Amino acid sequence: MKISLRKIGKTPSDFEVESDKMTFKGYLEYHSGKLILLKGHLEGTLPCECYLCAKDFDLPVDEAIEFFISDGLYKDEDGSMIDIIEAVDGQVDLDELLRSEIELLKSGYNACEECSDSEDFEYIDDDDSIE
């Protein structure tokens, strides 16, 4: 589902997109300048492979998503380093955003229930590294 950013105003515009067993829903709202705020929620199950034992399992997902979409190139003049996606064609593709979020979740260190319940299991945070 593609949405024209020029049509987004101060009144939130609701959206909902689905892919297999995942649902991404929320709203888009004009923030300031060229920035549109996206607040959403990603929910469902994601087929993954355990990074420890390599077994396939379904990862339960329940994530809040929030970032800005820039209508065109964004110049960070104040050094705020906020999460921004640039839409160079004046549209946001919500199906593509859903696919991107799914791939981001798949790329993490996901452990099946059996391995995560093991005494030898050590949770690896995104900020940690494997040595």
Image (tube, rainbow, N blue to C red):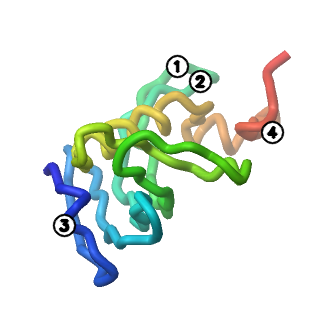
Residue sitting at x 29%, y 51%: 22
Q: CA distance from mark 3 to mark 2?
A: 43 Å
The residue tagged with tag 3: helix, strand or loop?
A: helix
Residue sitting at x 24%, y 47%: 90
Few, some or many C-alpha atoms within 10 Å of disc 3 (few <14, some 14-19, many ≥20)? few
Residue nearest the viewer, comparing 130 with 49: 130
Q: Amino acid at mark 2?
A: Tyr
Residue 63 visible to an observer of this rendering = no
- First in sequence, mark 4 or 2: give its number: 2
Q: Nearer the viewer, mark 3 or mark 4?
A: 3
Q: Nearer the viewer, mark 3 or mark 2?
A: 3
Residue sitting at x 40%, y 65%: 40
Q: CA distance from mark 3 to mark 4?
A: 53 Å
Query: Could you say which quadrant of the image residue 11 lies in?
Result: bottom left
Can you identify the residue that label 3 sits on? 7
Which of the labelled discs sits on residue 121, or is there none?
Answer: none
Can you identify the residue that label 1 sits on? 54
Which of the labelled discs sits on residue 119, or is there none?
Answer: 4
Looking at the image, the residue that sits furthest to the top is 131
Residue nearest the viewer, comparing 73 with 122: 73
Can you identify the residue that label 2 sits on? 51
Determine contact: label 2, label 1, CB under 8 Å. yes
Q: CA distance from mark 1 to mark 4?
A: 18 Å
